């Protein structure tokens, strides 16, 4: 049997044990020597199998401690929930906070506010002229004290310069409500979702384990004149999030 088939077979059996619950989160995977003996394969074959499972985000290899099944408790994100607050006439908790607290977990965040020349892709989405400024509210968001995702919201400076959006601190009623009060309610949004590997800075800030991709979720909000007034860029570690859309036929 080819070497590739051997390591794939070992990986498949371990994968099956993880998904079936025979090996649960935090459980230690048998040692390399034990796997070699159980499957009658070489050490290199075992290492290739473990490498495949690590790349899939199923296991975590810890130096001097061993190999363990990774904790997988994805946060369910429903992007359409944010739309429920648009034009509703009353404050609604942040969609992220609502998602976290509805699962009985604790939400937290660090916020930084700055006036910047936004990245080119953001400036294009906001239809800004060359060198036009934007206010960005950068958030590192936590679940149960652990960094979970980042959310950077960009607003045209000319619209929000004198509002709470341009000032430090949390906005309890939400930036969407402030935009509405400024005469720019969001009546339409466009979502783009893609996947890639994290940058070194993202991996450090979010404490992302090796082999874990991120989902990049970009939402552009438009006012009644179809002017883009907000671009929100979220970076979500793929092993910690599940994005669910619910659509109804008209």
Image (cartoon, rainbow, N blue to C red):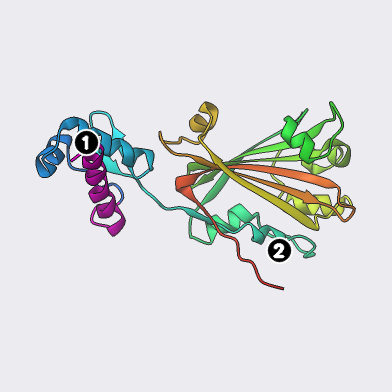
Rounded to the nearest whole Å, what is the CA distance between mark 2 and mark 1?
54 Å
Q: Nearer the viewer, residue 138 or 208?
A: 208
Residue 216 appearing in the image: yes
Residue 84 is labelled as: 2
Query: Closer to us: mark 2 or mark 1?
Result: 1
Q: Is residue 242 magenta?
A: no
Checking the image for residue 38, the label placed there is none
Q: Is residue 43 above or below residue 226?
A: above
Residue under the image location 66 percent in, 60 percent down? 80
In the picture, the quarter occupied by the C terminus is: bottom right
- Total marks in image: 2
Locate residue 110, reporting x and y percent: 60, 38
In the image, 182 versus 230, the foreground residue is 230
Provide the residue span drawn in magenta: 1-24
Q: Which mark is residue 3?
A: 1
Prevailing secondary structure class for the magenta stretch in the rendered image: helix
| Residue beneath the point at 25% across and 54% down | 17
């Amino acid at each position: 049997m080819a070497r590739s088939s051997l390591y794939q077979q070992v990986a498949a059996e371990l994968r099956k044990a993880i998904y079936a619950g025979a090996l649960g989160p935090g459980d230690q995977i048998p040692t390399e020597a034990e796997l070699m003996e159980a499957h009658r394969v070489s050490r290199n074959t075992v290492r290739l199998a473990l490498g495949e499972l690590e790349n899939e985000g199923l296991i975590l290899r810890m130096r001097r401690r061993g190999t363990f099944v990774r904790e997988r408790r994805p946060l369910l994100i429903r992007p359409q929930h944010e739309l429920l607050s648009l034009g509703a006439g009353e404050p609604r908790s942040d969609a992220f906070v609502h998602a976290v607290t509805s699962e009985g977990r604790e939400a937290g965040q660090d916020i930084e506010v700055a006036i910047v020349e936004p990245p080119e892709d953001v400036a294009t989405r906001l239809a800004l002229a060359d060198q036009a400024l934007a206010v960005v509210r950068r958030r590192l968001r936590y679940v149960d004290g652990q960094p979970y995702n980042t959310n950077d919201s960009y607003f045209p400076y000319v619209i929000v310069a004198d509002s709470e959006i341009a000032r430090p601190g949390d906005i309890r009623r939400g930036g969407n409500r402030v935009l509405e009060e400024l005469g720019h309610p969001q009546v339409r949004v466009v979502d783009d979702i893609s996947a890639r590997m994290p940058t070194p800075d993202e991996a450090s800030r979010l404490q992302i384990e090796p082999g874990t991709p991120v989902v990049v979720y970009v939402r552009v909000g438009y006012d009644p004149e179809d002017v883009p007034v907000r671009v929100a860029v979220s970076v979500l570690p793929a092993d910690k999030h599940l994005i669910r859309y619910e659509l109804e036929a008209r």
